């Protein structure tokens, strides 16, 4: 009896985190509940520079798009230059990444609830197109940083992010030896590196030509359809397989 109780507790404890994706039917054309996001997406004709691909339907405002292009924006007081000047080719990927995060209305299938002071929702494991991930890594490998997870652990005593004590500024390649390590690790698994190519309809593009339409709309529809069709939350299938032998015996009353 004790082992059956333990098995049940373990199952509940491990599956709870995977089921925290918000239960909703509006997975398409939605904005996150976060610090600078609009309540609903809408046109923003004057979005700045790299954020312009989202001007027809955006979750960000013009002022937000302008701040995203600054070396240290007042949005989060975050500086790219915490280990010296970041290479321009590298910085443009981070600007584009931020434009996607703040402006895109096509991230609904990957929005999850969080308990953070500056936002109530985040994205988790957005499938990023292979080319976007690889080019990001290639253009940043010679720039410098001191951390492999930029979501937490900074020294904020000065008001902006500084390298924490006992860390060393090294090249991106030292902290992120592969494109997947960069794309998945830097924002605490906000993205998932995939082998899907741009135009496949199965991966989100950071970079696209708005004159050809927004390819992420098709991607969001595909994954929203999978979610609404009752596909299990990501990761839970592996958990259930690992627990299957114990659960089987438990159901038979043999443990």
Image (cartoon, rainbow, N blue to C red):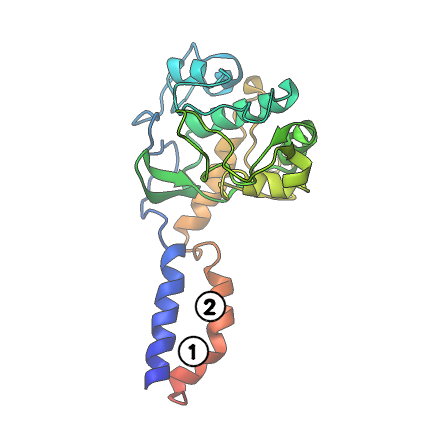
Tell me the quadrant of the picture where the N terminus can be found.
bottom left
Q: Which residue position holds label 1?
A: 247
Measured as percent of width and height from the top left, residue 78 is found at 45, 25
Q: In the rendered view, would you say 145 is above or below 243?
A: above
Circle 1 Cα neighbour tier, 10 Å, few/some/many (<14 / 14–19 / ≥20): some
Circle 2 Cα neighbour tier, 10 Å, few/some/many (<14 / 14–19 / ≥20): some
Measuring 35% from the left and 81% from the top, which residue is drawn there? 4
Measured as percent of width and height from the top left, residue 253 is found at 37, 88
Which residue ends up furthest to the top in the rendered image?
46
- Disc 2 from disc 1: Cα separation: 9 Å
Q: Which residue position holds label 2?
A: 240
Say what secondary structure mark 1 lies in: helix
Q: Earlier in the sequence, mark 2 or mark 1?
A: 2
Picture quadrant of residue 57: top left
Front-lying residue, 146 or 32: 146
Front-lying residue, 227 or 66: 66
Tell whether label 1 touches label 2 (CB within 8 Å). Answer: yes
């Amino acid at each position: 009896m004790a082992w059956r109780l333990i098995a049940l507790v373990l199952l509940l404890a491990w599956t709870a985190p995977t089921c925290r994706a918000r239960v909703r039917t509006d997975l398409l054309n939605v904005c996150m509940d976060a610090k600078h996001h609009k309540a609903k997406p809408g046109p923003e004709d004057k979005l700045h520079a790299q954020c312009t691909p989202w001007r027809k339907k955006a979750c960000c405002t013009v002022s937000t798009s302008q701040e995203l292009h600054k070396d240290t924006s007042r949005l989060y007081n975050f500086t790219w230059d915490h280990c010296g000047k970041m290479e321009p080719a590298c910085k443009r990927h981070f600007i584009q990444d931020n434009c996607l995060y703040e402006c895109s209305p096509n991230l609904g299938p990957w929005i999850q609830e969080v308990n953070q002071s500056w936002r109530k929702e985040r994205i988790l494991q957005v499938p990023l197109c292979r080319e976007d991930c690889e080019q990001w890594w290639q253009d940043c490998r010679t720039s410098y940083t001191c951390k492999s997870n930029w979501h937490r652990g900074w020294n904020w005593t000065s008001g902006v992010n500084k390298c924490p004590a006992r860390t060393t500024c090294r090249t991106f390649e030292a902290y992120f030896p592969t494109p997947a390590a960069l794309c998945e690790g830097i924002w605490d698994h906000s993205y998932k590196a995939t082998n899907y190519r741009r135009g496949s309809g199965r991966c989100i593009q950071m970079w696209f030509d708005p004159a050809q339409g927004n390819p992420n709309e098709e991607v969001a529809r595909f994954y929203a359809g999978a979610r609404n069709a009752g596909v299990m939350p990501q990761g839970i299938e592996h958990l259930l397989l690992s627990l299957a032998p114990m659960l089987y015996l438990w159901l038979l009353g043999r443990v």
